[in-house]
Amino acid sequence: MTSNDPVRIQTQGVHHITFMGADRQTSVDFWQGVLGMPLVFEQPNLDDDTQNHLYFDPGDGRLITVFTSETWKKDSRPTPLKAGSLHHLAFIVSRATYTQAAARLKTRGFDSSGEIDRGFMDSLYFRDPLGHIFELACYKFDPPHGFTHADVLARAHKIRVAAGAKNIADPHLADAIAEMSGLRS
């Protein structure tokens, strides 16, 4: 099969992600209160009228949704880390937000990993009230006009591999951006 195979289903991005929550207030307190995602609307779960369906805006106009039920109790035990499980969900944040995140999470009662350098981005991990792992991620670069972060990372990866480096780092990003900007001779 080629990349132009008409049988392939071509995705165009993430439409929404749905979590199983607990009671309504736990979800509103976390998604809107801690992460600042406005509650856009709510309605019954159309597949199960005993559940509520909350819709939050994570900042890019897409949706994070949460099924809730007043009979579901909050359980903060870590979600299983095994084959077939979701490890974590990462949200992009600005540099200014990232540098304040650990302290702000601590003020709200959430422990975090603290700031972690991932080479091409910085990360901070924490668990929500239901045991899910979340990451706040901040890229270390802005892509040149007309390019995406993925474009720069794909080029930086090729440069990294050619250099025999373990992971993408600042020199690979800088060279990729320079090449893509047409500044490199």
Image (cartoon, grey):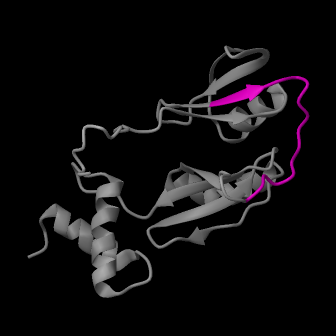
Q: Which residues are magenta?
A: 65-81
The residue lying toward the viewer, choosing from 112 and 76, is 76
Q: Position of residue 24 (x, y in %)?
A: 80, 25
Please identify the residue farthest to the bottom as the structure is shown.
164
In what quadrant of the picture does the C terminus appear? bottom left
The answer to if 64 sits in the magenta stretch is no
Q: Could you tell whether 25 is left or right of 39 in the image?
A: right
Prevailing secondary structure class for the magenta stretch in the rendered image: loop
- Residue at 34% of width from left, 39% of height from top? 10
The residue lying toward the viewer, choosing from 73 and 32, is 73
The answer to if 78 sits in the magenta stretch is yes
Q: Could you tell whether 70 is left or right of 92 in the image?
A: right
Figure disc tally: 0
Q: Could you tell whether 114 is left or right of 94 in the image?
A: right
Indicate whether 101 appears above or below 155.
Answer: above
Q: Position of residue 64 (x, y in %)?
A: 60, 33
Q: Position of residue 143 (x, y in %)?
A: 30, 57
Indicate whether 166 appears above or below 78.
Answer: below
